[in-house]
Image (tube, rainbow, N blue to C red):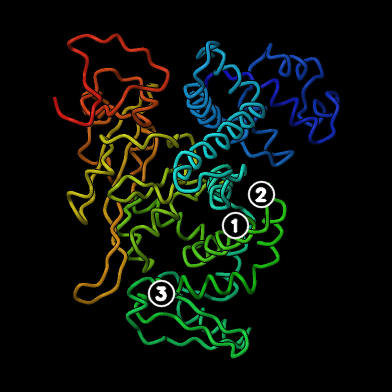
Amino acid sequence: MRKRFIGVRLKRFREERGLTQAALARALERSPSYLNQLEQNQRPLTVAVLLKLNAVFGVDVQRFSEDDEVRLLAGLRELFSETLAEETVSQAEMEEMAAHMPGVARMLIRLGRRQREIQERETALAARLGGALPSKPMPYEEVRDFFYDCHNYIDAIDTLAERAFDAWKLRAGNPQDALEARLRQQHGIRVTRKTASPEDAEGGALREFNPETRLLSLSSYLRPGQMAFQMATQLAFLEANEVIAGISQEARLSGAEARQLLGIGLANYFAGALILPYRVFLDQAERSRYDIDRLAHEFGVGFETVCHRLSTLQRPGARGVPFFFVRVDRAGNISKRQSATDFHFSRIGGSCPLWNLYEAFGHPGRILTQLAAMPDGRAYLWVARTVSHGHPGYDAPLKTFAVGLGCDIRHAERLVYSRRLNLKDSENFTPIGAGCKLCPRENCLQRAFPPIGASLEIDENTRPFAPYPV
């Protein structure tokens, strides 16, 4: 553990608990003068003090972690790179803010994010609407940011689902019968498989519940694992509704629509945590060295479902590898993105074309690995594969995505995918960035346009950014 000075964070923690310096010092079994030196950044945080904070107050060590600081620093770097003002903010100033004023940093990032989203909508819709646009973020954007800010782990929902798995006597890998029995015996709900129709193939409802007839209809196109997920989602609305409603009400959201969307997201989270219970799944993941295909086979779910669940394993005291999870289409649209730790997904200008996520489209169904290095010197192991969603039948429409799962290089040896990869040789690492508008790499062959705020010296050797090859 390198030296970390956390004075402001410690002061904020003490104020939140209503403690004086003397009271906190007694709780930590340290002298008041020692605690005062910590708060004045005259002493670094030690492992002993961090463990004592956890033992006495149940403080999540993530609160004082370096990963959180790196995540904030990436957000500040993106925020200030977009601000084309004469007054610039230095790297040292951003590092100081991320380390010692995290609350201010988060608020600035949030404000910048909202401003950018408004500007993007104005640009996209001005030609069609020609009028004033709403100044608040779209509901789905708020919900996406809620999960991102929670590091993709919701403890109240996850622990409730794990208790339900045990109480309802579900079987890992084959929970369908027990879920159906729970719906029937506890709620008087009968589950039926509705006959497939052409509308289903075009995106019809996978689950329909009629509260009057107490009938839950599931599409016959669903595989067993998907049916289990849909039944688990229905049970979430019936048996976890109070917890879901409480979280939705406490969340800082703008209105009823965003809260409703968050409720659906939390119900889906409960369903995933129910059919893939935390400790059972984490234990199997560790024993298989996070082999996604093996986990999918053992739990009877799809590749994407396993990746999504792996990105949530951040329970204090029982953490798995902190993963980043992302799903993109061929056009580069990111439809899902979750980060359990410090990886920063660019919100402007697309993502890096050198990322193996896009190469996966050229190798359908094949798992690709990549050692990637970011401009800030951090390195990652990425796993990518295509997944398809659709229904059987000739000429039936099919949706294809590339799913990526990544982790910091320091965790790579825990993954089966690090076999035959030289994690020590930097020559094996592909230099990628957060997207051309933010990436400082000047000599990248794939650069689409210069970074925001860059002043280019134009000469005959300048690499073109025009839409035509030169």
- Residue identified by numbered label 3: 204
Q: Is residue 316 visible?
A: no
Residue at 23% of width from left, 27% of height from top?
466
Secondary structure beneath disc 2?
loop
Q: Residues within 10 Å of mark 1 (few under 14, many from 20)?
A: many
> What is the C-alpha distance between the residues marked 1 and 3?
22 Å
Q: Position of residue 206 (x, y in %)?
A: 43, 75
> What is the C-alpha distance between the residues marked 2 and 1?
9 Å
The amino acid type of the residue labelled 2 equals: Leu
Q: Is residue 443 visible?
A: yes
Q: Which corner quadrant of the image does residue 452 belong to? A: top left
Q: Position of residue 300 (x, y in %)?
A: 36, 69
Q: Residues within 10 Å of mark 2 (few under 14, many from 20)?
A: some
Q: Position of residue 166 (x, y in %)?
A: 57, 70
Badge 1 vs badge 3, beta-carbon distance below 8 Å: no
Determine whether 201 is above or below 294 in the image: below
Secondary structure beneath disc 3?
loop
> What is the C-alpha distance between the residues marked 3 and 2?
29 Å
Residue at 50% of width from left, 14% of height from top?
91
Q: Is residue 234 left or right of residue 175?
A: right
